[in-house]
Amino acid sequence: MQRGSWQVRVGANPIIWSNDDFMDLGDDIPLERCLAEMHAAGYAGSELGHKFPKTPDALAPLLERFDLQLVSGWHSAYLLDSSFEEEERRFTSHVDFLARMGCRVVITAECSRRIYHDPKQPLVFTGRAKMLRDSEWMRLANGLDALARIAANRGLRLVYHHHMGTVIQNAHEIGRLMAMTRKVQLLVDTGHLLFADANPLQVLRDHRARLGHVHLKNVRAEVVMRAQAEKHSFATAVRAGVFTVPGDGGFDFAPVLDYLRAIGYEGWLVVEAEQDPRRAPPLQNARLGRETVLHLAGV
């Protein structure tokens, strides 16, 4: 889509239909229904989900049937806990797959010591400065820069996904990671920033030069506050409806989209929200998210 000199494409994440972390959420929804509804909602592309075929030869014709491009796919890195040789092997395989599918970014998050998948582990909001030692920060930054060079050699940019329940969660941690890396770009996820008490517009301004990818989702403030006060796990918060799509929830996306248009951002805008599809009908929410983004973006 475009308006004036601004060109932007709006994609969706299949997590609206089937959750990759809590697989009982949407486990009964076939992939073809997901892709058909994604197309019906007007999206131009999709990120990877766990139900997608694992080879380009199988995935490419399936996406073509529904007039969708592959936007990117998540890669879980374990640079703090594994050897770099093992991480390099796994990452290279994933990047080669994305490159064959015509992707331009590879979404990466450090998942060593993650707690977001554990329904019994409460999220940590305070005292996070001691989560990593200085030597571990250096190991993580050097490893990510090395992976970013591998991606660049294949025509892709590594975009780092900050995420609740990981070692890079809040604005301070994002800032330190960006300061310690040179080749890594940033994926700004509005929902995870809001959950972490960060201002998405400020993060965009702070890291404008490193912006590589955008995920748009909203939060329900009352669920965020309850999760913090009652020390909920990420799983509990998701099942309680902490995330929702643009057009629902309490955050106004207009300033964010105005800013992205003003700086000439030309990547994908990806709509997503980890919700229970039995409570949040996927097609209805997908349409609401896309229509809200296009309306506020003026495209």
Image (cartoon, grey):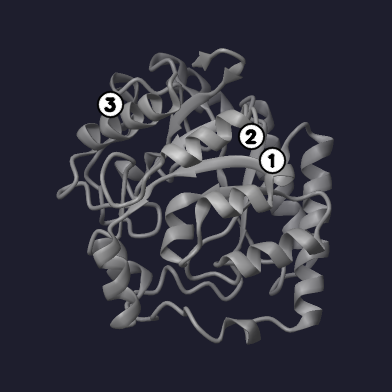
10 Å crowding of disc 2: few (<14), some (14-19), many (20+) = many
Q: Which residue does the image show at 64% across and 69% down from the upper left? A: 173
Which quadrant is the C terminus positioned in? top left
x and y percentages locating residue 282 in the rendered image: 24, 38
Give the amino acid at mark 2: Leu
Query: Cβ–Cβ below 8 Å for labels 1 and 2?
Result: yes
Nearest to viewer (mark 2 / mark 3): 3
Q: List the residue tagged with mark 1.
A: 95
Q: Which residue does the image show at 70% across and 50% down from the upper left? A: 91
CA distance for labels 1 and 2: 5 Å
Depth order, front residue of 83/1: 1
Sooner in the amino-acid sequence: mark 2 or mark 3: 3
Give the amino acid at mark 3: Glu
CA distance for labels 1 and 3: 27 Å
Query: Cβ–Cβ below 8 Å for labels 2 and 3?
Result: no
- Could you say which quadrant of the image residue 260 lies in? top right
x and y percentages locating residue 43 in the rendered image: 39, 23
Q: Which residue does the image show at 43% across and 59% down from the upper left? A: 194
Indicate whether 119 appears above or below 204: below
Q: List the residue tagged with mark 2.
A: 98
SS at mark 2 in the image:
helix
SS at mark 1 in the image:
helix
x and y percentages locating residue 203 in the rendered image: 59, 54
Q: Which residue does the image show at 37% across and 45% down from the upper left? A: 252
10 Å crowding of disc 1: few (<14), some (14-19), many (20+) = many
Q: List the residue tagged with mark 3.
A: 37
Nearest to viewer (mark 1 / mark 3): 3
- Could you say which quadrant of the image residue 113 lies in? bottom right
x and y percentages locating residue 70 in the rendered image: 53, 28
Depth order, front residue of 203/144: 203
Depth order, front residue of 32/202: 202
